[in-house]
Amino acid sequence: MMVGLESAVTFAVVLPSLLVAHNVADHWVQTSHQAANKGRPDWTGRWACLRHVASYTLVTALAVGLVWTVLGLPITAAGFLAGQAVSAVTHYWADRRFTLARLAAISGNAGFYRLGAPRDGHDDNPNLGTGAYVLDQSWHWLWLFVTALITAL
């Protein structure tokens, strides 16, 4: 396992690459159908989430692969694959929605999770500025940090 300055530089390059790829994949590449259905508690939801995570992982892999190649980073194939696997699994877990909602409840953040959400039976607050969205993005950023560490080692 490579540890030291090379690892630090690799981490410092991979993390922002993952964050940019995350924003593109989560907001531009994800389809409206996937976004609307990935949290459903049935096979439609599971498949929508799986398709989203597949395209998401393609984008993050391309971003890391690009900086790896162009900058000649000392990334191993095992580190690359392990990092992408952690990113994909944790992204799928959070994007099923009920899982993240449950974690928010367990951690005492259920009220924050519901912040800005439409009231039951109403469509009175359709926006991206919800507690659920913020917790979702925070969760993804945490795991992108871990992914960058894994990739750099």
Image (cartoon, helix red, strand yellow):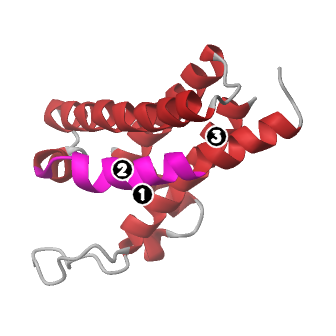
Q: Which quadrant of the structure image shows residue 117?
A: bottom left
Residue type at mark 1: give it.
Answer: Ala
Residue at the location (18% across, 44% down)? Answer: 34
Q: What residue would you read off at disc 3?
A: 148
Q: Residues within 10 Å of mark 1 (few under 14, many from 20)?
A: some
Residue 47 visible in the snapshot: yes
**Majority SS type along the magenta span:** helix
Q: Is residue 12 magenta?
A: no
Residue type at mark 3: give it.
Answer: Ala
Q: What residue would you read off at disc 1?
A: 101
Residue at the location (36% across, 50% down)? Answer: 98
In the picture shown, does residue 106 fall above or below 96? below
SS class, disc 1: helix
Report x, y in % for residue 107: 60, 62
Residue at the location (52% across, 61% down)? Answer: 138
Magenta stretch, residue numbers: 16-32
